[in-house]
Amino acid sequence: MADVKVGLYVSLQAKPGKEEDVADFLRKGLDVVQEEPGTVAWFAVRLNATAFAIFDAFPDVSGRQAHLAGRLAAALMERAPDLLAQPPSIEQLDILAHKLP
């Protein structure tokens, strides 16, 4: 398993009535990130009824940049005005420690 050094944390707030659309978008996003060799770990989570998040991990900055320039990020930005109450909050992280299989 590749070592991971950097990550992303993306906060998403669904518009009223769009909660299940956001959940479905995130579920379908897994198929896209499966094709990204630089994305070592990817999690889409629901924090409460309207709040969602994505956490990704990458071996290096170039893997993270490839993901940010990839199909899922483009689709999210395209759908954001319809699905989200505010633009996604994207934080770039340094990973200090991890446990992966």
Image (spheres, grey):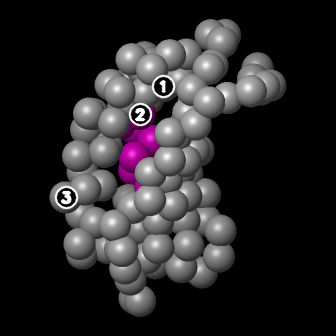
> Image check: 10 left or right of 94?
left
Q: Which residues are magenta?
A: 26-33
The residue at which mark 2 appears reads as 33
Q: Residues within 10 Å of mark 2 (few under 14, many from 20)?
A: some
Specify the farthest residue to the left.
78
On the question of residue 24 being in view, the answer is no
Q: Is residue 30 above or below residue 94?
A: below
Q: Is residue 85 above or below residue 57?
A: below
Q: Amino acid at mark 1?
A: Thr
Whole-angstrom CA distance, mark 3 to mark 1, is 21 Å
Quadrant of residue 20 within the rendered picture: bottom left
Q: Quadrant of the C terminus?
A: top right
Position in image of residue 74 (x %, y %): 23, 46
The residue at which mark 3 appears reads as 78
On the question of residue 52 being in view, the answer is yes
Q: Earlier in the sequence, mark 2 or mark 1?
A: 2
Quadrant of residue 100 within the rendered picture: top right
Q: Amino acid at mark 3?
A: Glu
Q: For the point 26% across and 33% down, which residue is it? A: 69
Mark 3 element type: helix
The residue at which mark 1 appears reads as 39
Mark 1 element type: loop
